[in-house]
Amino acid sequence: MATFDPTSLINMMRSVSVDISSNIITDIEFYLQNTKSNHNHVSFLVDDKRRNILSYSFNFFYKTKKFPFSIHAEINSITKYYKNTNLSKLKPKTILVVLKITKTGVIGMSKPCFHCRIFLNNNFDNLNLNKIYYSNKDILEQLYINELMDKESQHLSAGFKHCSRKSN
């Protein structure tokens, strides 16, 4: 198996003026080497003004055959941010970046699913969320805030589709 090449990830984040530290690259590489899933996502919550990473996280998979199977990366990084931040202080405007990445570093489609969009919509003000970006092969696309609850552009996650098939 080929090893992780972070070049695409680094370039993708630089396209929104965010540099990733070598420690974060090492964490991502460790995560990719130790996950069995083909649905590998990493999410970054970024200070919009300073362009520094406030929080980042990955999909977390439960060892269960019942829904929910996982916590998606965007929810995981936001929860991590809440745990490490005093929300009563002045909150910076934030950007959310969600990437799907293979074990070799190839970037894929990571548009937030229906359930994550509900979570983002419900936490929009607490996060002072300014922009949402997601990977789509070699580019970052923007999900506009007014599109969060737009039914035409929503999709279900692979885990939810799997769960729905089993219950039918």
Image (cartoon, grey):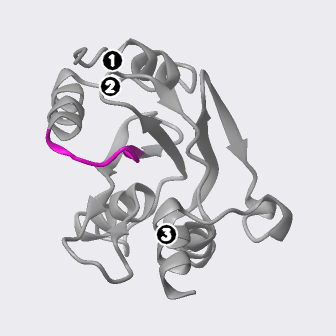
Q: Is residue 114 left or right of residue 145?
A: left
In the picture as drawn, the residue positioned furthest to the right comes out as 152
- Within the magenta stretch, is there residue 35? yes
| On screen, residue 73 above or below 103 | below
Marking on residue 6: 1
Viewer-nearest of discs 1 and 3: 3
Along the polypeptide, which appears first: circle 1 or circle 2? 1
Report helix, strand or loop for mark 1: loop
Image label count: 3
Report helix, strand or loop for mark 3: helix
Between 71 and 166, the residue placed more toward the observer is 166
Along the polypeptide, which appears first: circle 1 or circle 3? 1
The residue to which callout 3 is attached is 162
The residue under label 3 is which amino acid type?
His
Q: Quadrant of the C terminus?
A: bottom right
Gap between marks 1 and 2 measured at Cα: 10 Å
Which residue appears at 37% of the width and 72% of the height? 87
Magenta portion: prevailing SS class? loop
The residue under label 2 is which amino acid type?
Ile
Q: Which of the 4 image quadrants contains residue 81?
A: bottom left
- Crowd tier of the residue under label 2, counting other residues whose Cα lies within 10 Å: few below 14, some 14–19, many 20 or above: some
Viewer-nearest of discs 1 and 2: 1
Residue 56, image x and y in percent? 32, 47
Viewer-nearest of discs 2 and 3: 3
The residue to which callout 2 is attached is 20
Whether residues under marks 1 and 2 lie with C-beta atoms below 8 angstroms apart, the answer is: yes
Give, as a single range, the part of the protein colored magenta: 34-43
Report helix, strand or loop for mark 2: loop
